[in-house]
Amino acid sequence: MFHRLRIIQSPTEQMTAATDVLIAGAAIACATGVRGLRARAPWKAAIWTAAYGTVATGATLGAIAHGFEMSKATNTRIWQPLNLALSTTVALFVVGTVYDTWGEATARRALLPALAVGGAFWKTIPVGQTEFWPFLIYQAAGMLLALGSYGRLALRGTPGAAWMVTGILLSMAAAGIQADGRAALKVGVELDANSVYHLVQLAGILALYMGIRESLLTEASPEG
């Protein structure tokens, strides 16, 4: 199936896989950090931990899909759970946004509908390695909702909201790079649009973690 797991020969695909590995590692570290701050907001921490978990899952599958020689059919099979992980990430991100904007009770009510929308998107709009734009549209819709919500919270001085806005803007910039497909860098090795997308997305993931961390630290701080 995987041709004895031979590493793909394309240098650009190798770098895409490598940057996927970076994202997976960062997401696991972020999930661990968020889980460690669950003291006074366990449900909120659980949502963001799960979101980072699905990011790590998608990135790991992406590294396999990009990094190894395989048949087109096998590659397509890998992209199915990968797409489900990405769709679930967006759904959980929206739920996290609802929590910070309208509170835990509303977020709990939004969880199943958000996951259902993500599942329906995954089921009805299959996305392959060469057809990534439908996911980018779906992601952009979630990001725009979050940007409006966290933008208002940042103006009010809510802890962590400014970091969230930064992370969202970086994620949107990454999506634009991926959609355009023309970005390239040469820093000793050649990075195509996929790799540049991953690196900008990595910065966004870390900025979002800083926002979530600041918010959870505030919620978990003793009130005296």
Image: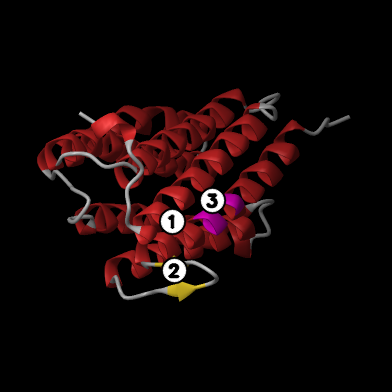
Determine whether, in the image, residue 37 is placed left or right of residue 133.
right
| Up-down relation of residue 1 to residue 205 (above or below) | above
Note whether 133 is above or below 188 in the view shown: above
Residue in front for this viewpoint, 149 or 210: 210
Residue drawn at (32%, 48%), measured in percent from left and top? 8
Amino acid under disc 3: Ile
Marks 3 and 2, how far apart at CA = 23 Å
The verdict on residue 24 being magenta is no
Task: Give the foreground label among 3 and 1.
Answer: 1
Residue furthest out toward the right? 224
Magenta span of residues: 202-206
Mark 2, residue position: 190
| Badge 1 element | helix
Q: Tell me which label, 2 or 1, sits earlier in the chain.
A: 1
Q: Which mark is residue 205?
A: 3
Instruction: Decide which of tag 3 and tag 2 comes sooner along the chain.
Output: 2
Q: Nearer the viewer, residue 159 or 171?
A: 171
Instruction: Find the distance from the CA under tag 3 to the CA under tag 1.
Output: 19 Å
Residue 71 in the image, given as x and y percentages of width and height = 16, 39
The answer to whether marks 2 and 1 mark residues whose Cβ atoms lie closer than 8 Å is yes
Amino acid carrying mark 2 in the image: Glu
Element type at mark 3: helix
* Magenta stretch encompasses residue 205: yes
Label 1, on which residue? 15
Residue at the spot 25% in from the left edge and 52% down from the top edge = 135
Q: Residues within 10 Å of mark 3 (few under 14, many from 20)?
A: many
| Quadrant (top left, top right, bottom left, bottom right) of the C terminus | top right
Q: Judge by depth and name the residue closer to the eye, 68 or 133.
A: 68
